[in-house]
Image (cartoon, coloured by chain):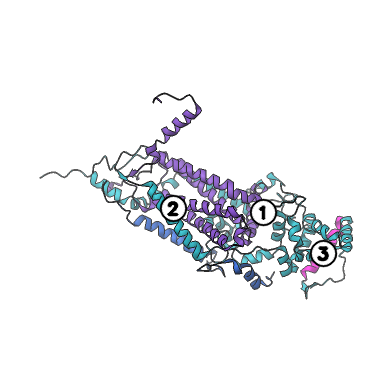
Amino acid sequence: MSAAEYPLAPNPAEEWRGKKRRYDLVKEAVIALVAVTGLTLVLAAVFSSPDVKPVTIAQWASADPQDFLATAVSELDGTSGVATYGPPYTHVPGAGQNIVGHFSLQRLVGVQLPIEPARAFVLGPLAIPAQTDPVLARAIVEYNRATPAERQAWDQAFAKAVDRGLVAGRLNLTPGNYGPVPTLMAGLLQMARSGGLDGALVSTDRFYQTNFTKALLFLSDGSYLENLASKQHLLGSQWGMMNETGNFPGQAWLWLYTFWYQISPFKSSDNADAQIWGIMGILSLAFILIPFIPGVRSIPKWIPIYKLIWRDYYRAASKANAPPTPSG
Amino acid sequence: MPLRGRGSTLLRMVEPTILGAVVDLNGSPRYVHQGWFLISYANLSVILLMIAVFALAIWLPFPGAQKDE
Amino acid sequence: MSEGVESSTWTGRVRDAGVAAFPPDRLLPDSQPVYVASWVYVFGVLTLAAFTVVLLSGAVIALAGPAWWHTSSLGHYVNSVHLWSTELFFFFMVVHLWGKFFMAAWRGRRAMTWITGAVSFLVSIATAFTGYLSQQNFDSQWIGGQAKDGLNASGIGAYFNVLNYGQMLLWHVLLLPLAVGLLIAGHILLVRRRGVVPPLPAEKEEQ
């Protein structure tokens, strides 16, 4: 054991010229692969994986028709989540989250996935059953021919009726000016319950489909999906980003991302998503660039776990570099 | 808005999805909740296990560490 | 072929540069510095092993398509393998990250090693996220509906549409694993190039 073999302060920029030991990398990799494969096969057999069935619009319309109708009429009258969202779905002046001040990347990028809520979620799908239902067909024509003010009045009157709740599964339509809206909504509810709306919201003028944007946006505009998520602690306010359904481990590594949503000012901010993405963007960059950040890159010296990791080396180096004992 | 028929719907959604699992991790999720701090038992277990494994990895002697070549 | 003569072909130059950067005994050494003697050092290879199992189990699912595991018990088991290998992948990667941080492993021109590792971590998160979206179940619906808001707020959602199943499936199965694979390969080559970082200087009392 010599001082040259065990330097006390090796230069990390230079090639190691000190003591080496035999180390079989390939054997280590093979053992690691076998061990990890075995562990995975056991974990998979013991715990399996979650597969909570997806919600269909048919299910939603059957389980919670009041919420379904409230959502449908909000798409008609332009008060739904999608209708008021702004970019990338709808043109709504001023809509969109600000990262800082009035600067919004959301508005800058603009509407790239255009959706017209009334047409996309209600009138377009209803054109299918209207082909064999003349009453429905006339209702659609009447709605399309009306002025914006008339439509607004009908929509809002119907929305108020939906708010009052269903009695024995039926809407209580007190005398009022609803226009063709009750016919449209009844038609949509029936279409939804039959499963036809699930298909209509995915279909386009092409045969093959892989894009579920419209169906998922419509589902997200309602409360049904959210209520189910809440039972599974998946809401943003429940640290949901970290969680999985049931008692499965989720994504613990997202703790810092979801943390911001739990504290002021973000938990009540309209710009929370943009602000938190901004913060996490900066922190992610800082994480990547730790080697260059003074202070942070010195933490390993201040919290000297390295002394434990390399304790055997330091012991050997201390012996190898000890001054020779005088011979007596 | 109250969740309608939530018990039966959740059950239907979850029911035959675990085939042959020894430990069924479906069912009502269990959480540690202190003020704004809320974490699932599962995630907490994973984090504690990571810390324990890290500590063990540092503490346990590595084969051949003491021997000279 | 005579040594010391520079090749005039692109092939030759690539070969010479490769061999110069990674001579065989540096690419696959059978010895390590004596300080590489702690269980903390095995978490890199454990992460790599878990990544391999993730890829293999994902490939098996791909053989039968993304809907297979909902109706087949074997498919469900393979999906479970894919899930748990991913959990292990992140578990080992985080422990590896903690070890490397407390060893200040970026010292001695090893900043790029740290950077490739850190970026791999972040891209792996994106890969796992698109995996959730590919499941075609309640999770996918909920996670897509939630994630869209953050992505839309930063402008990304207009082009990376988490509600577009086809797009997310292809990102998950092809683009992101390729990115992670290349980053990991670069990361490992950098470790081989520079060698494992030596210990921090011993304190005075240890001398």
What residue span does the magenta drawing correspond to? Answer: A147-164
User: Mark 1 highlights which residue?
Assistant: C163
Q: Quick check: marks 2 and 1 in contact, CB under 8 Å? A: no
Seen as rendered, the residue at the extreme left is A328
Q: Quick check: marks 3 and 2 in contact, CB under 8 Å? A: no
Identify the image quadrant of the N terminus of chain C.
top left
Q: For the residue labelled by badge 2, is the local secondary structure a helix, a strand or a loop?
A: helix
- Residue A191 image offset from top left, x and y in percent: 78, 63
For label 3, the crowd category at 10 Å Cα-Cα, with few meaning under 14, some 14 to 19 and many 20 or more, is many
Query: What amino acid is found at the position of numbered circle 3 in the picture?
Result: Gly
Residue appearing at x 67%, y 47% in the figure: C158
- Residue B54 image offset from top left, x and y in percent: 40, 56
| Horizontal relation, residue B36 to residue A75: left or right | left
User: Mark 3 highlights which residue?
Assistant: A187
User: Mark 2 highlights which residue?
Assistant: A33
Q: Colour of chain C?
A: purple
The CA span between labels 3 and 2 is: 58 Å
Q: For the residue labelled by badge 3, is the local secondary structure a helix, a strand or a loop?
A: helix
Q: Is residue C120 above or below residue A235?
A: above
Q: Is residue A222 magenta?
A: no
Seen as rendered, the residue at the extreme bottom is A168
| Horizontal relation, residue A13 to residue A244: left or right | left
Residue appearing at x 58%, y 46% in the figure: C175
Q: Nearer the viewer, mark 2 or mark 1?
A: 2
Q: Chain of mark 1?
A: C
Rendered image: mark on residue C34: none
Q: Is residue C106 visible?
A: yes
